[in-house]
Image: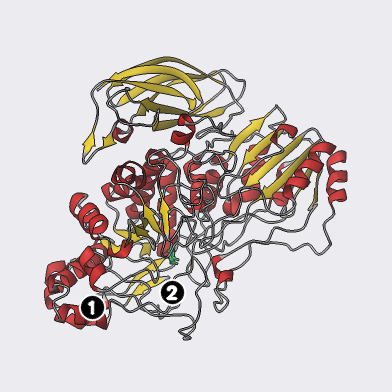
């Protein structure tokens, strides 16, 4: 029988309670965070582990799923839910109880080094996937940890920058994916390192205490980001419940200068003796410690830790491998295609680029996962194609960057994703010659992003643009495959025959790529983020990003992503939610079912199976004197249709798309046009909803 949490708390001594709110090193050295438990009362330890792309238990392997951004690109919360269940089963298999995922910060800045770990520039799309991931993880009795609460939208100066953001913008854009997680019953929320309007998030009485806990009724525990606790009493009184990792690490030298973006590892132990002292001095009420402990124990009870009814795990199973591949395939976005794709089975292919022999697992930092096996692009295409597949690197490797490399004294033991390191020098001439001899040239290019650092530029690093241009000049059937953690510049796109965005596809890389290129799968992905020329995004001056004098001013307000491009003269390169299919769809009979539901009949008029993502956008009525985005994404429904097949698809309209925040939520009375179509820029029907 599960012991009663209140009784346990009553029986606990003060020192035992303190053990449950401050992290300690894991004796097994595998967990990312560890709470030692209370052996006298049979309360076992709680183990927390990174992260969003797969389990990063130290020294262990796990399924390397695609980047979270690729999951969002599927526009398919059900698939995200399934991914959540698999992540949780793998956490279990490694003896871990709480997963430090999902990351749900809204993509405000295209340069952000962690965009690959997040979901979207759109709060509704991010909320739908946030809810699904949390629900999936927790349905397997693992605690989900939604992070990083809130306004952690850049890595530059992340440990101290203050996001200067007004209430309406917070409510309409940055808070919704967290609120969705809370509505899904998330067990834990991780505070961000940064400040919001001058206050560190660990100490943010209003956002943690008032909004998250009181207003939204969050009943789980709030955990600090690693070394991200600003003060003892401030955090405890604001509502922070658990300090992580709890113990100092790094050089003892007080003069050591921590690189930008790296938290000060000597700043730890604030919830140890200092918390006891703060309680003795009356700076923190004793009842607060009881509340912290109650929240931790309640989650332990919920996942069966207190009565030994824990579930078994599952690691690297066939269904997890298949799932990693399915997400990678479905998340792949066909940005441009003049008809070169899909490839014919017997095409002779030149596969070109400095990393064609490696699966692109992810970006750098706490989300790095080491898989049991992976499929490189060369292996994937060689296995699938019936023609010849030749490869050439063309140019030198792109140096990968990792948070761990930024710390000279840390041996994080992370492994590169290289499966085979070529020994000869690459030659551009070889790549061009291979392109000339082949039916089709496929060029693989990548960016290099990591936690703790933002990109300096959206241009591809190294000589990759030069490689694409040289290959395109040699073969007019050139396909470029982007592997990026967010938008990149594509200056050569008019000169190539097709452009594909694969994000960071994870262990299934080459298999998923072959499946899309040869048309075994329709590219199911749509862009969760706008691709636009550098300098045209809303946060394009130093005051907004990376900020001035320690403050990043969110002056663009709610005009983030496509909401900005809708209101400006600047044209995106590839708009939000864009993505071609190999099939072709006709929309008809759009109708309003009720004020929250629309439907439309979609027919696949192509001679092949295809996957459509039917989308709906709400256009608010004018007037009222409030500057609102021209339209807001309200929901989507993916549907697979065989050649000639049609289906009537319903899209649920998220209330957030109708609402605006003005000291409280309001839905203005009036007529709302609801646009139904393939993307924000490809509307096929408009209906009207009265509110
Ligand atoms: C990151 C978190 C991560 C934690 C533990 C921090 O640097 O911001 O996302 O979960 O480290 O590795």
For mark 1, what is the residue? 275
Q: Is residue 645 left or right of residue 26?
A: right
| Residue identified by numbered label 2 | 264
Mark 2 falls on what kind of element?
loop
Front residue of 9 and 386: 9
Is 402 or 314 nearer to us in this picture? Answer: 402
Residue sitting at the far front:
549
> Horizontal placement of 532 versus 15: left or right?
right
Q: What residue is rendered at 46% in x and 55% in y?
A: 547
Dot 2 beta carbon under 8 Å from ligand 1: no
State which quadrant residue 412 falls in.
bottom right
Instruction: Point out the quarter of the image occupied by ligand 1.
Output: bottom left
Alpha carbon separation for disc pair 2 and 1 = 20 Å
Q: Position of residue 609 (x, y in %)?
A: 57, 27
Residue 563, position in %: x, y? Answer: 44, 34
- Residue found at x 55% / y 59%: 450
Above/below status of 104 relative to 549:
above
Mark 2 or mark 1: name the one nearer the start of the chain.
Answer: 2
Taking depth in this image into account, of 455 and 118 the one nearest to the observer is 455
């Amino acid at each position: 029988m599960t012991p009663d949490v209140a009784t346990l708390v009553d029986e606990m001594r003060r020192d035992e309670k303190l053990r449950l709110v401050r992290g300690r090193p894991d004796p097994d050295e595998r967990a990312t965070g560890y709470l030692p438990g209370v052996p006298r009362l049979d309360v076992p330890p709680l183990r927390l582990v990174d992260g969003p792309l797969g389990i990063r238990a130290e020294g262990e392997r796990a399924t390397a799923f695609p980047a979270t951004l690729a999951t969002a690109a599927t526009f398919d919360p059900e698939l995200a839910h399934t991914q959540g269940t698999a992540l949780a089963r793998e956490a279990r298999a490694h003896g871990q109880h709480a997963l430090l995922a999902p990351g749900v910060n809204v993509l405000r800045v295209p340069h952000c080094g962690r965009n690959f770990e997040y979901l979207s520039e759109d709060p509704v799309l991010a909320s739908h996937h946030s809810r699904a991931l949390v629900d999936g993880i927790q349905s397997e009795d693992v605690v989900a940890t939604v992070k990083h609460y809130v306004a952690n939208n850049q890595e530059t100066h992340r440990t101290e920058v203050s996001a200067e953001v007004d209430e309406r913008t917070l409510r309409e854009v940055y808070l919704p994916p967290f609120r969705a997680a809370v509505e899904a019953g998330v067990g834990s929320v991780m505070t961000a390192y940064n400040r919001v309007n001058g206050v560190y998030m660990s100490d943010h009485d209003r956002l943690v205490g008032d909004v998250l806990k009181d207003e939204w009724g969050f009943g789980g525990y709030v955990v600090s980001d690693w070394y991200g606790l600003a003060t003892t009493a401030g955090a405890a009184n604001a509502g922070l419940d658990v300090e992580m990792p709890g113990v100092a690490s790094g050089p003892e030298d007080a003069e050591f200068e921590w690189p930008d973006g790296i938290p000060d590892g000597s700043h730890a132990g604030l919830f140890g003796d200092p918390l006891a002292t703060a309680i003795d001095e009356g700076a923190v009420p004793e009842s607060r410690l009881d509340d912290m402990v109650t929240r931790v124990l309640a989650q332990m009870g919920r996942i069966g830790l207190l009565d030994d009814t824990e579930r078994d795990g599952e690691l690297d199973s066939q269904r997890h491998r298949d799932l990693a591949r399915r997400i990678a395939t479905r998340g792949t976005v066909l940005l441009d295609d003049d008809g070169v794709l899909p490839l014919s089975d017997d095409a002779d292919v030149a596969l070109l680029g400095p990393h064609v022999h490696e699966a692109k697992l992810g970006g750098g930092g706490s989300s790095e996962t080491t898989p049991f096996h992976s499929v490189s692009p060369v292996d994937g295409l060689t296995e699938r194609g019936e023609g010849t597949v030749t490869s050439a690197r063309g140019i030198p490797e792109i140096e990968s960057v990792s948070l761990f490399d930024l710390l000279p004294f840390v041996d994080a033991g992370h492994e590169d994703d290289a499966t085979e390191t070529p020994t000869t020098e690459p030659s551009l001439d070889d790549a061009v010659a291979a392109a000339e001899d082949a039916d089709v040239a496929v060029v693989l290019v990548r960016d290099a992003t990591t936690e703790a650092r933002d990109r300096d530029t959206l241009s591809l690093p190294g000589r990759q643009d030069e490689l694409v241009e040289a290959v395109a000049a040699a073969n007019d059937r050139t396909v470029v495959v982007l592997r990026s953690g967010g938008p990149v510049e594509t200056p050569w796109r008019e000169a190539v025959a097709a452009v594909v965005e694969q994000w960071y596809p994870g262990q299934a890389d080459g298999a998923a790529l072959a499946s899309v290129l040869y048309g075994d799968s329709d590219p199911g992905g749509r862009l969760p983020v706008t691709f636009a020329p550098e300098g045209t995004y809303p946060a394009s001056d130093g005051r907004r990003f990376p900020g001035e004098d320690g403050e990043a001013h969110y002056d663009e307000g709610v005009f983030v992503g496509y909401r900005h491009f809708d209101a400006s003269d600047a044209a995106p390169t590839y708009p939000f939610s864009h993505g071609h299919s190999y099939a072709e769809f006709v929309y008809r009979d759009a109708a309003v079912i009720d004020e929250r539901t629309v439907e439309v009949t979609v027919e696949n008029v192509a001679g092949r199976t295809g996957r459509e993502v039917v989308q709906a956008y709400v256009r608010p009525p004018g007037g009222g004197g409030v500057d609102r985005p021209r339209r807001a994404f309200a929901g989507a429904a993916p549907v697979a249709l065989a050649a000639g097949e049609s289906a009537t698809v319903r899209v649920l309209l998220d209330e957030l798309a109708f609402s605006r925040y003005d000291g409280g939520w309001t839905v203005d009375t009036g007529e709302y046009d609801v646009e139904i179509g393939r993307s924000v820029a490809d509307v096929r029907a408009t209906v009207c909803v009265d509110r």
